[in-house]
Image (cartoon, rainbow, N blue to C red):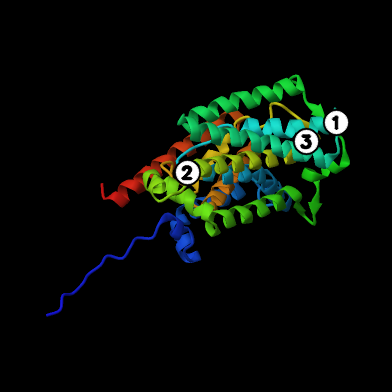
Amino acid sequence: MSTALTSTAPQPSAFQRALATPARLIKPKLGILMGLFLMCAALSYLSPAFLTTSNFINVLRQVSTNANLAFGMTLAILIGGIDLSVGPVLAISGTLAAGLIALSGLPVWLAVLLGLGCGTFIGFCNGFIISRTGIAPFIVTLATMQIARGMAYVYTGGNPVSCYVDRFNAIGGGHIGLLPLPVLYTAGVFLVMCFLLYRTKFGRYVYALGGNRNAAVYSGINIDRVQVLVYSIIGFLSAVSGIVLCSRMYSGQPTIGNGFELDAIAAVVLGGTSFSGGTGTLGGTLLGVFVIGILNNGLNLLNINSFWQLVVKGVVILLAVYVDILKKRGRSGK
């Protein structure tokens, strides 16, 4: 007599789902895609300027900054953390690069390298403190947010640092054809981040850490190293955005980046990344970036007061988190 053996097929991990076929990737995003389409349709009806080529290029240029920050924020939220310091890190990195060129006379390449190093170092410090002390990422990055902003004010004396050096200004103000260089930078960042997250051990460790921290520890993953790497990458991407933005504005400004962390977090949660960690994709984040960017652009075209724009974005974040909660309840059957 033979005994029939039955087995339950293992469920795919969040990492494996991220590598699924395009059709399976698109299906969970149908809601946000539909919302994006409806928003574009409404704005094209309300404002004739919305569908123009110049406005489309302007939207791409504007979303490029938030996209870099949001890609980094995705990593933080995937491991169950968060980074509130991206805006001030952007500010100190950009103003440092501009100041070193305009005030100290350093070569552009060296100033840019030091600006990138500054942002990466602050991100490294975030990850090191979080991993070594056990202090919640919210608290650590909240403190770093204040420190980095204060450093930007101290370095500049609270005043913009003008920088009219062609090689520096071309970093953020140049074009290739119709496409601004910041858009091309962001496209490159997206491809590199996708490779890191979906084709390397580091990406598997990120999903494992966010999915089940204890299981990740027992499986031999060095979670301290993963956290340090994640926050270092966030600091580097913030520095990239800061240097490009200050280059476009011909000056380093200590006030730049205020509220940028809000847009980055909104884009990530709109894209379907769970605040509890372990679930989310960079493709979803990119969609979220476009939703936030087009929303900002549309509100500006409609001459909506900037204070009301903050209210709208706050409501969007609240709704996105609530939708995430509803999805979890649906999966758990509660």
* Disc on the earlier residue, 2 or 3: 2
Which residue appears at 86% of the width and 38% of the height?
107
Q: Position of residue 295 (x, y in %)?
A: 58, 42
Which numbered circle lies on residue 102?
1
In the depicted structure, whether residue 234 falls above or below residue 27? above
Which residue appears at 69% of the width and 42% of the height?
240
Label 2 is placed on what type of residue?
Answer: Ile
Viewer-proximal residue among 330 and 89: 89
Which residue appears at 45% of the width and 63% of the height?
24
Q: Which secondary structure lies at badge 2?
A: helix
Label 1 is placed on what type of residue?
Answer: Ala
> Dot 3 corresponds to which residue?
249
Q: Position of residue 193 (x, y in %)?
A: 60, 52
Is 61 on the left or on the right of 274, as rendered? right
Viewer-proximal residue among 62 and 21: 21
| In this view, the mark in front (2 or 1) | 2
Per the model, the C-alpha gap separating discs 2 and 3 is: 39 Å
Callout 1 environment at 10 Å: few (<14), some (14 to 19), or many (20+)? many
In the depicted structure, whether residue 237 falls above or below residue 219? above
Callout 2 environment at 10 Å: few (<14), some (14 to 19), or many (20+)? some
Label 3 is placed on what type of residue?
Answer: Met
| In this view, the mark in front (3 or 1) | 1
Is 99 on the left or on the right of 274, as rendered? right
Tell me the quarter of the picture where residue 106 sits.
top right
Viewer-proximal residue among 187 and 11: 11
Per the model, the C-alpha gap separating discs 2 and 1 is: 41 Å
In the depicted structure, whether residue 44 falls above or below residue 6? above
Q: Is residue 32 visible?
A: yes
Is 212 on the left or on the right of 170, as rendered? left
Which residue appears at 55% of the width and 31% of the height?
310
Q: Which secondary structure lies at badge 3?
A: helix
> Dot 2 corresponds to which residue?
223
